[in-house]
Amino acid sequence: MIKFENVTKAYPDGTVAVDGLNLEAPTGKLTILVGPSGCGKTTSLRMINRLIEPTSGTIYLDDEPTSGMDAALLRRRIGYVIQHAGLFPHKTIVDNVSTMPVLLGESRQKARTKALELMERVGLPASFAKRYPWQLSGGQQQRVGVARALASDPAFMLMDEPFSAVDPVVRGQLQEEFLRLQREIGKTIIMVTHDIDEALKLGDQVAVMRVGGKLAQMATPSELLTSPADDFVADFVGRDRGYRSLGFTKTAGSVAIGEEAVVQLGASGEEARAKASGAWVLVVDGGRKPLGWAQPELLNGELKRENLNLSGIPAAASGTMRQLLDAALSSPSRRGVVVNEHGELIGTVTATDVVKAIEAEPHLETAR
Amino acid sequence: MNFEWLGRQFDNIVFLLGWHVLLAVIPLVLGLLIALPLGWWAHRSRRIYPLLVGVAGLLYTVPSLALFVLLPLVLGTKILDPLNIVAALTIYTVALLVRVVADALDSVPEDTVQAAKAMGYRGYQSLMKVELPVGVPVISAGLRVAAVSNVSLVSVAALLGIPQLGSLFTQGFQLRFFTPIIVGIVLCVILAMILDGLIILLNRWLTPWTPKVVAS
């Protein structure tokens, strides 16, 4: 647990970066500090490992005030990831990752062995071990940054805009992988971001801060979307709140899934026409995995792979209302493909079915 | 070129070359050792930087001959003592390298310094294990200038009668005889090139991590 108690940071020129912050980041959870620039989120983060000293108030690490600790020893207990990775350019990747264990007195060889394991864990091939940071892409460097922060197996981790310096595709990958990793390791993490979508996607709880360094609201992502505390939070969380909050609502069997007749590749035009409902027919492979939609009217001979329309995105039956609705809206037949956990077809849903299920729910049951 | 003279004087030339090397290299090493803490100080304090770099620049403008003559008065050494040359060239080396060391430390990316601190490196650990190693390419670039400059400055000491390759110049002028002058110039140039090459090699050995495209 990391706890802020009445923490204020004021500079001699009178600027107040953080103003009486009270906040608790529970053990094993990912807490996100989000807000516009100048809201004091990075200052707050840096006060935890005392890169910046608070003017007043106390920060606790598992009930122990940090102010009494030796700053260097305190920092060695906390993993730290920053925006541009901040790798040591003169050290190989494996030595970058070994940094903290070596500082903590572990032998270089032991630290390297562990570092290699960690590299694999964050998706870096072992062949990168002897390379230097300049030989890696931004996304790869950021993975090294995460591995380095985890190397001493710290209970706490601080992450300062860890994914914002890479392109959107890589960012998405890194976020997914990080979520998976965090589910395994369950560190107590505080992450700073200016990106509300990232906050809602990753956070177990999200602290929205406003300019002047005050906490505006602390809540789970779905609470932020469904009941923002005030105009500022509502505005910051942004448009499409209603739609996005569906991303936190499990379908839980409430949506009627219809039967869908299917054909396989190689089917004749007649068979396809016979099975089609409306203008479209669903095509699956031998294992009932959906391949795409086809229009029998346009078929010239037997059904081939190039006849398929691939625009639909299948949704898992165990997924959220948002995924289900998206499956229906993205499908050319307007029937969304629903699959089980093995990716095999269960049936299809229409947007109307999904909306009916949403309207039928008296209270939005949240997923988290 | 009088090769017969060259043959006769061979031992003497080697002796002069040896002194030249000592008088150029010892101040280079001493100067670097003194410039490191001073440069670090200039890097740390924005107020000290202009002061130190300004004084260093001023020192470098003092004519070498004047310094060679003045230093015995300050140090209490005899005018013919080679120590004067070592001291004078050390001063020049420091004057050149204070700024170089400060700029080398400034060249370390802020993210890297920040990360070192956040990982729990103490100040001196960060300096020795991160900032100085990362600053090596900038320092060795400055060291190359100082090395070449020292090789040429040493020869001025010939005017005081301290033996080194410069003695060949004074000898040649007195005798109106060009062979020693040419030998002196050639050996000075070769010595400068060798020192320069050694520093390049040392830099490569210390910085296997720099992108290989950089031409030196």
Image (cartoon, coloured by chain):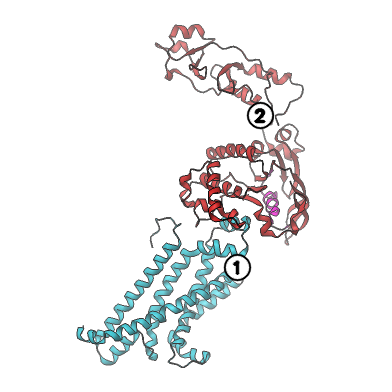
Q: Looking at the image, which residue is at 57% across and 49% down?
A: A148
In three-dimensional space, the C-alpha distance between marks 2 and 1, rounded to whole angstroms, equals 51 Å
Q: Give coordinates of residue A123: x percent, y percent.
A: 52, 41
Q: Is residue B165 visible?
A: no
Q: Would you call the spot at circle 2 few (<14 residues within 10 Å), some (14-19), or many (20 or more)?
A: many
Residue A217 is tagged as none
Q: Would you call the spot at circle 1 few (<14 residues within 10 Å), some (14-19), or many (20 or more)?
A: some
Q: Looking at the image, which residue is at 47% across and 9% down?
A: A272
Name the chain under label 1.
B
Q: What secondary structure is marked by label 2?
A: helix
Q: Give coordinates of residue B54: x percent, y percent.
A: 54, 76
Residue B44 is tagged as 1
Image-based side of B190 in relation to B145, left or right:
left
Q: Chain A is drawn in which colour?
A: red
Q: Can residue A145 be seen in this view?
A: yes
The amino acid at mark 2 is Gly
Q: Looking at the image, which residue is at 31% across and 86% down?
A: B169
Give the quarter of the image for residue B179. Answer: bottom left
Q: In the image, which residues are magenta?
A: A32-54
Q: Give coordinates of residue B156: x percent, y percent.
A: 38, 85
The amino acid at mark 1 is Arg
Q: Chain B is drawn in which colour?
A: cyan
Q: In which quarter of the image is the C terminus of chain A?
A: top right
Question: For mark 2, what is the residue?
Answer: A247
